[in-house]
Amino acid sequence: MFPKYDVIVVGAGHAGCEAAVAAANLGSKVLLATMNMQTIAQMSCNPAMGGVAKGQIVREVDALGGYSGIVTDHTMIQFRMLNRSKGPAMWSPRAQSDRMLFAAKWRNMLEANPNIDFWQEMVTGLIVKNGVVKGVTTSIGLEIESKSVVLTNGTFLNGLIHIGEKQFGGGRAGERAAKGITEQLISLGFEAGRMKTGTPPRVDGRSLNWEIMEVQPGDENPSKFSFTETPKLVKQRPCHITYTNPEVHEILKTGFDRSPMFNGRIRGTGPRYCPSIEDKIDRFAQRERHQLFVEPEGWDTVEIYVNGFSSSLPEDVQYKAMRKIPGFEHAKMFRPGYAIEYDYFPPTQLSISLETRLVKNLFFAGQINGTTGYEEAACQGLMAGINAHLTINDEEPFVLKRSEAYIGVLIDDLVNKGTNEPYRMFTSRAEYRILLRQDNADLRLTPMVKALGMQNLEGRLERVSEKEQNVTAIEKFLRNTSVDPSEINGFLAEKNSAPLKQKVKIQSVLLRPGIDLEDLRKNISTLGNFLENYDSESINLAGINVKYAGYTQKEQEMVEKMNRLEEVKLKNDVDYQSIVSLSAEAREKLSEMRPRTIGQASRISGVSPSDISVLLVHLGR
């Protein structure tokens, strides 16, 4: 009935979709297995992509040939560049999406790929022989063979939904949980744990009083995520902001005795940075209000997502409290918020390629690894799909360093440090965030993935090359072209910046605090005329490169020091137990995790700098 596949991807969420297209675009024959073909690429929680650090990840996924950025550009209803008041390393794109169009566009793009087949049924187990995965088994007893398997089960593994004192099995509202895989993996020697996440109520936008809420519009000149030729957003839907109040908090507290969070029924660890509303009013009792973002679910629906009001309290308490929020006095609820517990597998059981250590050719990606967020899932899926293809073709794994991508930071953190709470990416997790900006992801990453043989990069390298040439030309002009004091001193006075006394290069003016290239473009005629020949993306990147050159040079020097450790390889058969100068914990951790380099070993929890010195001596360094 079935051919033998190169890669079977289990689960069609954000991780599964990216895994499938990555492997398929490298030439593998892929089967994407999902319990429901109608919920492919479902936005299970908020209808948005990107955000602080997450936006950088989406742009990196796009630069590597993934589809999340393209799908978002085609289906977004609002775009905002966050953190514009801070330095460019912190600028983070975020888009509000049309939930239904997002899923439909993803499915269309998957179906357009001839290397991807689909199967709608629950996968209940793996076929494992002599420590190597050979395929999957399904709920109706089918055995489907493959050379590799990528598990992207999201919140479905033994998922348990909580609403007040009610609890029932499910992977998300209206869908059943997945059974069998956890139990088999444990029998194979894997360690499993439980995590928890939640979602807020959905309400009828026709029942809200929009007039008394703050309007949150999109950017005046919206940008986009993909480096390809995707459509520009020409109209936008606004979001709105409102706040809770002490009366709302008091009503919510009446349900605490029936809360699964507070009475011990939920045992899984929830996300620290996206707490439920009951958790917020318990932990931050001194605060009289909490901000809520009232977000539309699409262009043509009245369904509204109440961002910031995630809850697992009884539905009657949620409803009563919600109606005390300004603007929600007559709100009609479509469905209550709920919490969901699910199984995950501590990611220290993976190699840096996301292949499991216990079973060869088996890869994990997404929430099964303890992460939270569409973007974190998507990038793991992309990397697992790439490496599943490379592994079965006896090629070296594709690994991104911490200095090369936020994706590299995320995977390195997971594999070497693990996580005991849902892992979310932040800019603060990256040591080299000045280098890892959202505006240069294509320059950093597209040449790397092109070298792998990715087939959907038509025109991308040409665009990257053109962008590099444009940026170089603009930087050269800024370095070599002078500006006369008479032309610029008026503007400098407006900025409270010291006047020029003689001609200077434009670059030296740009280096002054509070002055950017757009300012100079408007006030220096030769520069304005020159830049008319260049696109805004190249202009912005050149301005950032010149203005922050000193900082980027320092970071690059740090990278080069770290890379010297990354280049010192460790063989997989090193007998760490025999190196008696290592601490007992280091011997145990190194034996278990088998780092590929000294640099990776240095980031393993429990391995000290003195242990690294011992290893270098052992290697003759």
Image (cartoon, grey):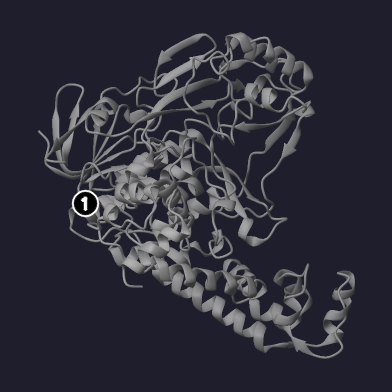
Q: Nearer the viewer, residue 355 or 264?
A: 264
Image quarter hosting the N terminus: top left
Instruction: Tell me if I can see residue 500 in this picture.
Output: yes
Callout 1 secondary element = loop
**Residue at x-position 65% and y-position 21%:** 206
Q: Is residue 497 above or below residue 487?
A: above
Q: Is residue 168 above or below residue 457?
A: above
For this orientation, the residue located farthest to the bottom is 502
**Residue at x-position 66% and y-position 55%:** 221
Residue 577 is situated, as x and y percent measured from the top left of the image, at 28, 52
Image quarter hosting the C terminus: bottom left
Q: Nearer the viewer, residue 37 or 325?
A: 325
Residue 128 is situated, as x and y percent measured from the top left of the image, at 15, 36
The number of numbered badges drawn on the structure is 1
**Residue at x-position 20% and y-position 45%:** 360
For this orientation, the residue located farthest to the front is 580
Q: Mark 1: which amino acid?
A: Ser
Residue 40 is situated, as x and y percent measured from the top left of the image, at 37, 34
Q: Is residue 126 left or right of residue 272?
A: left
Q: Is residue 445 left or right of residue 591?
A: right
Q: Is residue 595 left or right of residue 60?
A: left
Q: Which quarter of the figure has residue 497?
A: bottom right
Residue 54 is situated, as x and y percent measured from the top left of the image, at 53, 48
Q: Is residue 486 left or right of residue 522?
A: right
Q: What residue is shown with label 1?
A: 28
Crowd rating for badge 1 (residues with CA inside 10 Å; few <14, some 14–19, many 20+): many
Q: Is residue 167 above or below residue 428?
A: above
Instruction: Tell me if I can see residue 121 in this picture.
Output: no
